[in-house]
Amino acid sequence: GAAVSDQVYWVPVEDDKLDWDNSTFYITYCSRYADHSYLEQIPAPALRATALLQDPEHVRVLLTAAGATLAFFTRLRLVSAAGDDVLPAEWEDNYVSVFPGETRVVTVRVEEVPTGASVVVRA
């Protein structure tokens, strides 16, 4: 069958604690937020990125997790030669996770890919 979704969610040990006593019709505050600090303990992934210019408006990025570590919540940016974000940019996916041995393909569409542009990857 066809894939329905490839989203990755990280479930905390303890959920947010909502302050229902001080809730209003438009906001409910948290008295304690979920602890996600363990995400900082994930080792840095061995991530390879290859950017391919498809046409003047599209760049295709291949992300491969070459090591044994998950590349969790990987952020992609298309930047100009000066290091500025190329905007507006429409990514087909963002903050992607790549499992060990897996390759993900993500495409970005912009009005025109500037000369000297590159893709910045932060995992």
Image (cartoon, rainbow, N blue to C red):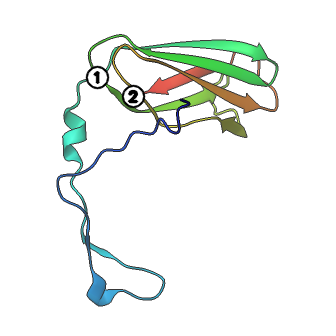
| Horizontal and vertical percent position of residue 103 | 47, 16
Q: Which disc is residue 4 wearing?
A: none
Q: Which corner quadrant of the image does residue 112 belong to?
A: top right
Q: Residue tagged by mark 1? A: 44
- Compared across the picture, whether 2 is left or right of 52 comes to left
Q: Is residue 107 above or below residue 11?
A: above
| Label 2, label 1: how far apart the Cα atoms are | 8 Å
- Look at 31% across and 25% down and name the residue there: 70
| Horizontal and vertical percent position of residue 54 | 75, 15
Q: Do tag 2 and tag 1 residues touch (Cβ < 8 Å)?
A: yes
Query: Could you tell me which secondary element the residue under label 2 belongs to?
Result: loop
Q: Give the residue type at disc 2.
A: Ala
Q: Give the residue type at disc 1.
A: Ala
Q: Which disc is residue 123 wearing?
A: 2
Depth check: give the residue in front, 4 or 81.
Answer: 4
Q: Which corner quadrant of the image does residue 91 belong to?
A: top right
